[in-house]
Image (tube, grey):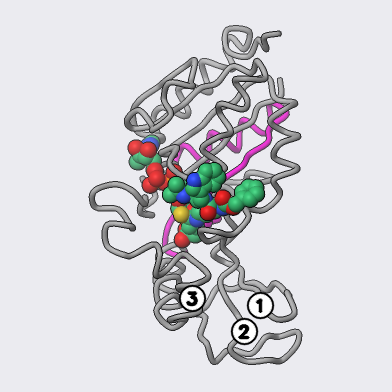
């Protein structure tokens, strides 16, 4: 069975990484237009670096949870395309062999002049020089901000079109193009499932809905899927 899994901030919430749109979430405390747009970075790069430096330190202290582990095990049993909107590396640290980071990775930075990408595990500053071209004031976090094109959309679309089952985990369905993946899959006859604490903004496009913490509901759902795959993944049409 070919399974497309889309994860969002909710899969890492129980690892201590904040979600965005909860009443106490990241965007309740910080302005996304100031900190997660190219225009915001051009206006105040120091504030943007401070924001991502703090989140990087938080990430380095976090650990994968049972949902990440269950998704690692799923990769060993099926043909899995694991697409995450998250910039954390918790899927990798749980052992997932291939992770498609459509919104980039917090532990990488890139040079806005020469495009070189480098590992970034320590704080980033406007004073840092690019290790490749040597210029200063050119490095930024390798993340996808509003108005920028997410990574690997062609590969994502191909995987969506080949899937026998689409599963969204811990994502609000508020940010496009990711929020449109479930309806695209469904229109192609692919069964769709969502696992979330509460119904997402696009809950009506899911055939199967499981609500509760990802650390409980993801292992439970995947156990049910393993026990009776035909009940979940029969592609229509
Ligand atoms: C739990 C849980 C637990 C909690 N267990 N669940 C229409 C079409 C196309 C684009 C647009 C459009 N309208 C507007 C746009 C533009 C824009 C957009 O979507 N804006 C919306 C606000 C309307 N999109 C873009 O700009 C994107 N680029 C783009 O469109 O390019 C043009 C283009 C596209 C395609 C082809 C050609 C051109 C880029 C979007 C970049 C998003 N960047 C961010 C920041 C990344 C870096 C960082 O982390 O700082 O990505 S914003 C933020 O939102 C982050 C996330 O990846 C993303 C999604 O959030 P997510 O993961 O869903 O988190 P939450 O907080 O919203 O939800 C958490 C969920 O978990 C909730 O449902 C909880 O209930 C649940 N949960 N605890 C299970 N324990």
Judge whether residue 99 is colored magenta.
no
Left or right of 217 on screen, residue 155: right
Separation of residues labelled 2 and 1 (CA atoms):
5 Å
Q: Which of marks 2 and 3 is nearer the N terminus?
A: 3
Image point (62%, 27%), residue name:
184
Q: Which of marks 2 and 1 is nearer the N terminus?
A: 1
Taking depth in this image into account, of 132 and 68 the one nearest to the observer is: 132
In the rendered image, which residue does mark 3 sit on? 41
Residue 155 pos. (x, y %) = 75, 42
Q: Work out whether 169 lies above or below 107.
A: above
Image point (47%, 28%), residue name:
219
Quadrant in the rendering for residue 48: bottom left
Residue 11 pos. (x, y %) = 44, 42
Separation of residues labelled 2 and 3 (CA atoms):
11 Å
Quadrant in the rendering for residue 51: bottom left
Left or right of 84 on screen, residue 212: left
Q: Are marks 3 and 1 in contact (CB under 8 Å)?
A: no
In the rendered image, which residue does mark 1 sit on? 112
Q: Which mark is residue 234?
A: none
Separation of residues labelled 3 and 1 (CA atoms):
12 Å
Q: Which of marks 3 and 1 is nearer the N terminus?
A: 3
| Quadrant location, the C terminus | top right
Q: Residues within 10 Å of mark 1 (few under 14, many from 20)?
A: some
Q: Residues within 10 Å of mark 2 (few under 14, many from 20)?
A: some
Magenta part of the chain? 60-89
Image point (36%, 52%), residue name:
20
Q: Residues within 10 Å of mark 3 (few under 14, many from 20)?
A: some
Q: Do the residues labelled 2 and 1 touch (CB within 8 Å)?
A: yes
User: Looking at the image, can residue 64 be seen?
Assistant: no
User: Looking at the image, can residue 164 be seen?
Assistant: yes
Most extreme residue toward the left is 23
């Amino acid at each position: 069975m070919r399974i497309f899994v889309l994860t969002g901030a909710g899969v890492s919430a129980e690892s201590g990484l904040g979600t965005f749109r909860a009443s106490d979430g990241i965007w309740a405390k910080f302005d996304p237009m100031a900190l997660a747009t190219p225009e915001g970075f051009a206006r105040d790069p120091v504030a943007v670096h401070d924001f991502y430096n703090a989140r990087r330190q938080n990430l380095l202290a976090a650990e994968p949870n049972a949902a990440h582990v269950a998704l690692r095990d799923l990769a060993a049993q099926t043909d899995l395309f694991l697409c995450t909107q998250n910039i954390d590396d918790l899927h990798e640290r749980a052992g997932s062999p291939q992770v498609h980071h459509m919104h980039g990775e917090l532990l990488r930075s890139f040079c806005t002049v020469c495009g070189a990408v480098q590992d970034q595990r320590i704080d980033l500053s406007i004073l840092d020089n690019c290790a490749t071209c040597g210029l200063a004031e050119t490095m930024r976090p390798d993340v996808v901000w509003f108005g920028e094109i997410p990574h690997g959309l062609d590969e994502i679309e191909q995987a969506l079109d080949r899937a026998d089952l689409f599963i969204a985990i811990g994502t609000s369905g508020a940010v496009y193009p990711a929020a449109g993946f479930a309806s695209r899959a469904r229109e192609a006859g692919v069964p769709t499932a969502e696992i979330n604490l509460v119904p997402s903004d696009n809950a009506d496009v899911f055939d199967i809905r499981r609500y509760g913490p990802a650390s409980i509901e993801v292992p439970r759902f995947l156990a049910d899927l393993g026990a009776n795959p035909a009940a979940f993944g029969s592609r229509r049409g």
